[in-house]
Image (tube, rainbow, N blue to C red):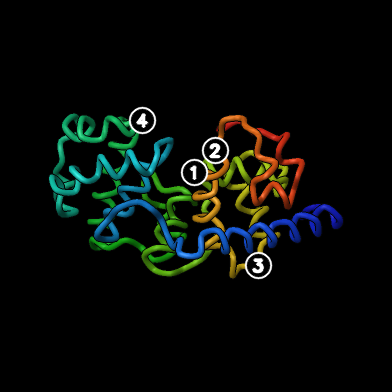
Amino acid sequence: MMASKKFKERKNRAIKIAKVLNRLFIDEQGTSLGYKNNWELLVSVILSAQCTDKRVNMVTKKLFKKYKKLDDYVSAKKTEFEKDIKSTGYYKNKTKNILSAAKMIKIDFSGHIPNNMEDLLKIPGVGRKTANVVLNNVFNVVEGIVVDTHVRRLSIKFDLTDNKNPEKIEKDLMEILPKKYWNDFSFKLVRYGQEICGARKHDCKTHPLTKIYPRANTIWPRAK
């Protein structure tokens, strides 16, 4: 737990930020990744690591036409699959995780995506970020806060955490934000990072969230 004064300041700031984000992106709900079923969402989120959603959607548009069922991934050839997803980066590791995940889900979970954090974290390639996205979008279950590169960067920039590790940042955000804000906060802060306050250094003193915390105009965390 943070020191009392800092905790209160961050809690007030986080709530103000969440309210501004809700006004800025009133219709923003859920992930921007394209998918038609639970398995496709899981694949998309695994592919999104160190890759833009736009690029992932370009890749999965073809991928999901080629591999239509879970069994198609179970029987997929590693080298061919690597070529299919190569442009998303880290394709060898992503291939290993996705194909292993398909086999585990088929064998251990009877072909169904688990609906709880504990079981999701057993699946290859699934960390808390991926699990939170799946739980939020598929099952409407909110167990945590999705911390991707945008959420990580902006949480540091607006002094909502002293940590750099995504899981520790998630814990800090969960402490200072009421649970009712958890789901929307992630997706809308991502949108803010994509459309308003990008990672490259620039003058952002007139940006909506910088008005809440003016010092943010001088803070430019590393993307990783």
Residue tagged 1: 194
Rendering coords of residue 69 (x, y %): 16, 54
Labels 2 and 4 touching (C-beta < 8 A): no
Q: CA distance from mark 2 to mark 4?
A: 23 Å
Q: Nearer the viewer, residue 32 or 224?
A: 32
Q: Quadrant of the C terminus?
A: top right
In the rendered view, tell whether residue 173 sits above or below residue 162.
below
Q: For the residue labelled by badge 1, is the local secondary structure a helix, a strand or a loop?
A: helix
Residue tagged 4: 90
Q: CA distance from mark 3 to mark 4?
A: 35 Å
Q: Amino acid at mark 4?
A: Tyr
* Residue at 16% in and 32% down: 80
* Residue at 57% in and 41% down: 197
Q: Earlier in the sequence, mark 1 or mark 3?
A: 3
Q: Nearer the viewer, residue 30 or 72?
A: 30
Labels 2 and 3 touching (C-beta < 8 A): no
Q: Amino acid at mark 2?
A: Gly
Rendering coords of residue 42 (x, y %): 33, 52
In the rendered view, tell whether residue 206 sits above or below residue 181.
above
Q: Is residue 4 left or right of residue 97?
A: right
* Residue at 63% in and 60% down: 20
Q: CA distance from mark 2 to mark 1?
A: 6 Å
Q: For the residue labelled by badge 3, is the local secondary structure a helix, a strand or a loop?
A: loop
Residue tagged 3: 178
Q: CA distance from mark 1 to mark 3?
A: 24 Å
Residue tagged 2: 198
Labels 2 and 1 touching (C-beta < 8 A): yes
Nearer the viewer's eye, disc 3 or disc 4? 3
Q: Amino acid at mark 1?
A: Gln
Q: Is residue 200 left or right of residue 7?
A: left
Nearer the viewer's eye, disc 1 or disc 4? 1
